[in-house]
Structures are given as C-alpha cells and as structure tokens.
Image (spheres, rainbow, N blue to C red):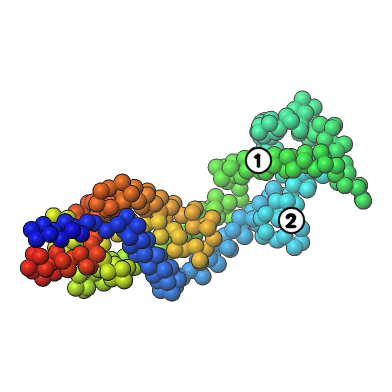
Amino acid sequence: MINNSDVIDVYPLKKSKRILTWLGDFFINFIATILIFNVIALPAAKAIIGYEDVTVARSAAENHETDVLYGNKVLFYEENEWHDFESSLLTTFDYFMSYHVQDQKAEDNVYLTYYVSIKADSQGLQDLYASRSGDTYFDLDILDANGIPTLKATYEEEFAALYIEGDTLSTNAQTDYEDISSLFLKYYYAMMSDIQINDLTYDSMSYIDLSNQVTAYTQTLDYTVVWASIVSYLISIIIFYAIIPMFAIKGQTITEKIMKITKVGQNTLRIISKPERLLQASYAVFTNMTLMVVSVVPMVTITYAFNLPLLLFFSIFGLFYGVISLFFILFNQYNKTLTDTFSKVILLEDLDLQKVVKAKGNKY
C-alpha cells in the first residue's frame, strides 16, 4: 500500500496468503464435516431408518439368494462355506475342473445343470462355451457324452496334477489354471445375468424378487450415508461460512480472523454487508463439495465411498470448481478466487483496511 497525501493505492492480498486463507477455511470445514458426520448426522440417520434392521434384512435376502442357487445345484459349497458366495464359487470352480479333467459327472457342471436340465437350452450351453474365447481351452467340435465341448488334451494333461496326491502344477500350468479360472467366472457371470432375466425359483423363493430386495435394502443403506454426508457438510458450511461471519464485526471467517484479513467490496472498499456474507456462504457450498465424499471415509472404505454416485458427482464438481479457483488466484491480477470474482470482493490485510477507513473518514 502506497500512502501519499492525495492518493491511497490498495494492493490485494498476496497470492500465497490468499491460497493459505482458502486452504485454512477448507481444512476447518473438513474437520468440522467429519466430526458432525461421525458424531451427529450418521448416528441420527441410522436411528431414523433402523439401519441395523435393514442390514439384517439385506443379509437374510442375500442368504436366500444363495439358497436358490444351492437348491438348483448351480452353486456348490463345503460345510464351512454355507452362505459364503465367494468361497462357494471357488468350490463350484473345483467341481467344474473335476468334470473336465476327471470323471465328467453331469451334476458337477453347473452350466450343464442350468442350461440343459433347468432351461432345456442345449444351444445356449454351446454358445456359452464358444463365447469369451472359450475355444482357447475347449475343443468346440468334440463333445463329450453330455454334449459339452471337451477340454483340450494339452490342458487336460497339465491339470491332471491337481488330482494326483503330492503333485503340483508346473509354472505354465498354474498360469493356464488362473486363466481358465477367469474364463469360468466370465461364464458364471453370463449365467447369472441370464438368471436375472429369466429367474430361478426354489422353495417358493424367486431369485429376481430376492435380488430386487437386496438392491432396495442396499440403496436404503447407501442413501443413509449419502444424506448424512450432505447434511453434515451443509451444517458445517452454515456454521463457518454463514453464522460466524454474520455475527463477526468485520464478517470474517475463522481463518480470516486468525490471519487478520477482511473481505471488502471490490468497488467500495467497504466491509461486505450481511446479505453479501450470505452470498459468500452460498458460493462456499460449491467450493468445498469435495469434502462430501472425503468426510465419509473414516466410517467406510474408500472404494465404497467412491461407489456412491451422488457423492462422487458433488465431489468431482467441487474439485473442478476448486481447481478453477486456484487458476484464478494464480493468474488474476487481484489474486481472487472464482467466488471472489462472482461476488465482486477482494481480501485486504486489516492494517491496509484501517488506513482505507481512516482516509475515507468513516467506520467499517
């Protein structure tokens, strides 16, 4: 700031300080959002919807789904794998390999059971084996007694070690085994997709109905987390960007107060009015939206958090808005964020503001 007898030149806040102010408010908002989410919003949301009851109901529906698959012999399990779908799927793969390498017992091949015994669709079975590069491992022109393409002799010899006590797979055989395991999973996914369309019933239970129940319960649980996060975020914004500045004499946020910085009108150099402070708070909603997905991570896994579409959308929007604001600070002559530009404010150090006030002969 240059102070002559007739002219006062006011310089905006330095870029480094503007960025630090922005990050300081962001960090405070971040901590507050996490605390509100974990201590207040999520527990309250869980109580409102009966979160534990919904979780139990979803688990029961998922167990009934596997019951339908078990009952139709399209999923196998060992004694300790009851209702454990992933472990049961590995066991089902073992039965599948045993069918092709050892005894060709019809009941061991879930695809034979589903497509031929249940659907009476032999062509569907042939199409399944021919799909997804199945001809790499299976000879589509040579069918066994059950009408299934046979495993090529090379692989049958490689995998024979699986059924010889004390023997192990060679390095190449292990690689092929993992590849055919992936192929098996692709086949199984295709079969399950068909079940989702054509349904499968057992003991008066419909797989499609159960699947719809699981989806509904899952959406309820997901939306509980989503709305708790949104509410936590908005409460934090209201407290730190609306209420505190509204009752502060100079309309400062906590970071601005600590750093002795004040927002003033770009054209008037007066401290922004209360309506303008509310406008600033509304812009803050967009600025920090990235916090919505980050705030839930302490309670859930990162993978789960990023699989919540609404939170992910808000967070990407907030990140985009924040990056643009950073570019505005770096390349704008007044070192203003995108929000500063929209609301036509600049940030001044309190010392400079006092000199402006003194020179203009008025109060804040």
| Residue displayed at 74% across by 47% down | 93
Q: Do the residues labelled 1 and 2 touch (CB within 8 Å)?
A: no
Q: Does 181 appear above or below 37? A: above
Q: Is residue 107 left or right of residue 203?
A: right
Q: Nearer the viewer, mark 1 or mark 2?
A: 1
Q: Mark 1 points at which residue?
A: 186
Which part of the image, by quadrant, shows the N terminus? bottom left
Between 247 and 63, the residue placed more toward the observer is 247
**Residue 29 sits in which quadrant?**
bottom left
| Residue displayed at 81% across by 31% down | 152
| Residue displayed at 61% across by 55% down | 65
Q: Can residue 47 be seen in this view?
A: no
Which part of the image, by quadrant, shows the C terminus? bottom left
In the orientation shown, which residue stands out farthest toward the top? 141
Between 214 and 251, the residue placed more toward the observer is 251
Q: Is residue 188 left or right of residue 207?
A: right
Q: Mark 2 points at which residue?
A: 77
Return the x and y of residue 344 as percentages of the image width and height.
Answer: 19, 54
State the separation of the CA atoms marked 1 and 2: 19 Å
Q: What is the secondary structure assignment of the residue under circle 1? A: helix
Q: Using the image, tell me which numbered label, if any, was put on residue 206.
A: none
The numbered mark, 1 or 2, whose residue comes first in the sequence reads: 2
Return the x and y of residue 153 as percentages of the image width and height.
Answer: 85, 32
Return the x and y of residue 283 as percentages of the image width and height.
Answer: 27, 57
Q: What is the secondary structure assignment of the residue under circle 2? A: loop
Q: Is residue 125 visible?
A: yes
Mark 2 residue type: Tyr
Q: Does 219 appear above or below 52? A: above
Mark 1 residue type: Lys
| Residue displayed at 70% across by 39% down | 183
Crowdedness of circle 2 by 10 Å Cα count: few (<14), some, many (20+)? some
Return the x and y of residue 155 as percentages of the image width and height.
Answer: 82, 35
